Amino acid sequence: MENAKRKELSNLATQARMLALDAIYTAKSGHPGGSLSIVDVLTLLYNGVMNIDPANSKDPDRDRLVLSKGHGAPALYAVLAQRGYFPVEDLKHLRNVNYHLSGHVEMNHVNGIDMSAGSLGQGISAAVGMALAGKLDHKNYRVYAIMGDGEITEGQIWEAALVAAHYKLDNFCGMVDVNGLQIDGPTEKVMNTAPLDEKFRAFGWHAINVDGHDLDALEKAFAEAAATKDKPTMLLLQTVKGKGVSFMENQVGWHGKAPNADEYQQAMAELKSQMEV
Amino acid sequence: MAEKIATRAAYGDALKKDGKENERVIVLDADLSAATYSGRFAKEVPERFINCGIAEANMVGMAAGLSTTGKIPFIHSFAMFSTGRVFDQIRNSVAYPHLNVKIVGTHAGLSVGEDGATHQCLEDIALMRVLPGMTIVNPCDAVEADAAVKAVMDYEGPCYLRIGRNPVEVVMDQIPGYRFELGKGVLARDGKDVAIFATGIMVQESLKAAELLAEEGISARVINIHTIKPIDRDIIEKAARECGVIVTTEEHNIMAGFGSAVAEVVAETYPVPVIRHGVNDEFGRSGAAQQVLDAYGINAQGVVDAVHRAMSLKKK
């Protein structure tokens, strides 16, 4: 990746983190930890990897993304707003009963959302359905889905994994946000799922371990997924929950809690300092 | 006696016929295509049939995803597994986003017979009724099952189609001017002393019951409600006004099902006594289909008994 492009994306991601946190702070509720961990990959996807056009958001030939871990909505909403799907100012109304931005991603009122999700384990199936439709209709679009590493214990994920491999959905690229934490604690203590790469390979997938905050490595991984034929690809994103805010990083308590005024100020100051000039 | 055809057989033929013509239709099953008769479509149009394996939750989600691309997915399993097992998936991935998915539950009710309680779904109407925007269709015979397939295919939005396993008499072909219209009840027999609202296979039993009641001098109106949601409020209110007492009958738990839906309308429009006939908050059990139905009183005599109870409540 060119230096200028990397810097542009990195700043977009930092700005998205600020927008997401600002939305959660204003709403006084939301999920900062798992939003911050997926901002980098979403930024890259919507600014170069995915074939999308915000001015034609229902294009039948577009690439699609399902945020199966629907509680990461603040991150996806922020990236979509930056991209022009709806005004950035709308983010101030996250989780507000009088506005359209639901706490979990919702497709009928939020431009750019390809599937409503939030009840864990379900988004991947919808994404597999979209990929299957692409194959049946001989279309070239690709479908992406992001799961949480806590979510991965849902049995439906593995039902979908079997089907995606059985029907050779090489137009499908899944991702697991492996940030190592879930509500009740470290995933290895709550329910150990390791090794995820070997599990997906055993299910007939191409699996890639990749640093979920390294834009160059991610770009390479998406290219490798696109070049992989006859099987779906799963990216195991090695991420830091709460990435970018020192006191949130790797802290299980920041799964689903809004910052108070002091914490918000500190978080925004830290993020601002990460902007590259 | 009229010809007997299982609604699943008529359904399977209709899906094959109408689904073949409509290129948007895609059929999914969870390893029961030989029993749900979705296999008839699969044989005819294999390129638009997807076997999902025994994994109903993922099947529902895939259908949701397929529908977002403009396809019309019909998903199949026994009613127990296509509604009860996957309630959350239907609620959150289909009903909440109001996607154009057609959920088909075959082997509904006690008439599954020998397989017993685990496979006899008596709760599906209740489960689907509480989902906003869900249309519920329960055809009574082969004629109606055939018409229902085309109707739900042409309708844009989530639908649940309740289908039976056992052969049942074809009766709707004898109704003058019969025409299937979503949301509209069918006057199957006129009468003035009591109105029997029936759905599914209880339509035939109610017609038999009306014959028995006529011998006692009771004039029973029989109304076939194939669309349980949205329900035909007008035909219910009219019957309440004109007959003064109502009996409902269903091959389903009487709680939160079809009878409850009718009673809600009666209570809010023209309150008269309502007796709900069906399975009295119990599970089913194994046995030959007719024996199981008889054991639970899900037959014409059960309807007659319910009418007697209702008549005793009727205001003079």
Image (tube, helix red, strand yellow):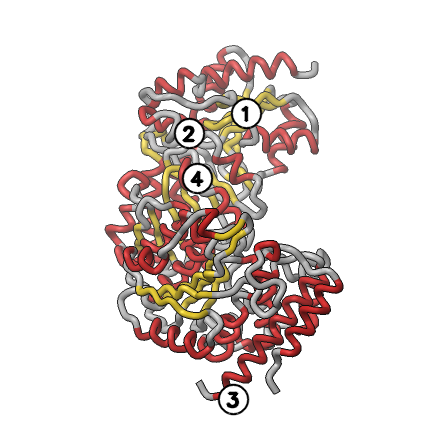
Where is mark 2, residue-wise?
A: B109
Q: Which residue, given by chain and number where applicable, does mark 4 sit on? A: B85
**Amino acid type, label 3:** Ala
Badge 1 crowding class, 10 Å Cα cut-off, few under 14, some 14 to 19, many 20 or more, is: many
Quadrant for residue A201, please give it.
Answer: bottom left
Point out the image quarter for the C terminus of chain B.
Answer: top right
Q: CA distance from mark 1 to mark 4?
A: 32 Å
Residue B288, horizontal then vertical, whole percent? 31, 21
Same chain for marks 2 and 1? yes
Q: Are marks 1 and 3 on the same chain?
A: no
- The mark that comes first in sequence, 1 or 4, is 4
Q: Is residue B309 above or below residue A169?
A: above
Please identify the quadrant where the N terminus of chain B is shown: top left
Q: Nearer the viewer, mark 1 or mark 3?
A: 3
Q: Position of residue B40 (x, y in %)?
A: 27, 46
Instruction: Determine the CA span between mark 4 and mark 2.
Output: 15 Å
Checking the image for residue A4, the label placed there is 3
Whether pointer 1 and pointer 4 mark residues with C-beta atoms closer than 8 Å, the reply is no
CB under 8 Å between discs 2 and 1: no
Residue ID for mark 1: B196
Q: CA distance from mark 3 to mark 4?
A: 52 Å
Q: Nearer the viewer, mark 2 or mark 3?
A: 3
A144 lies above or below B41: below
Q: Nearer the viewer, residue A177 or B150?
A: A177
Mark 4 is on which residue type? Arg
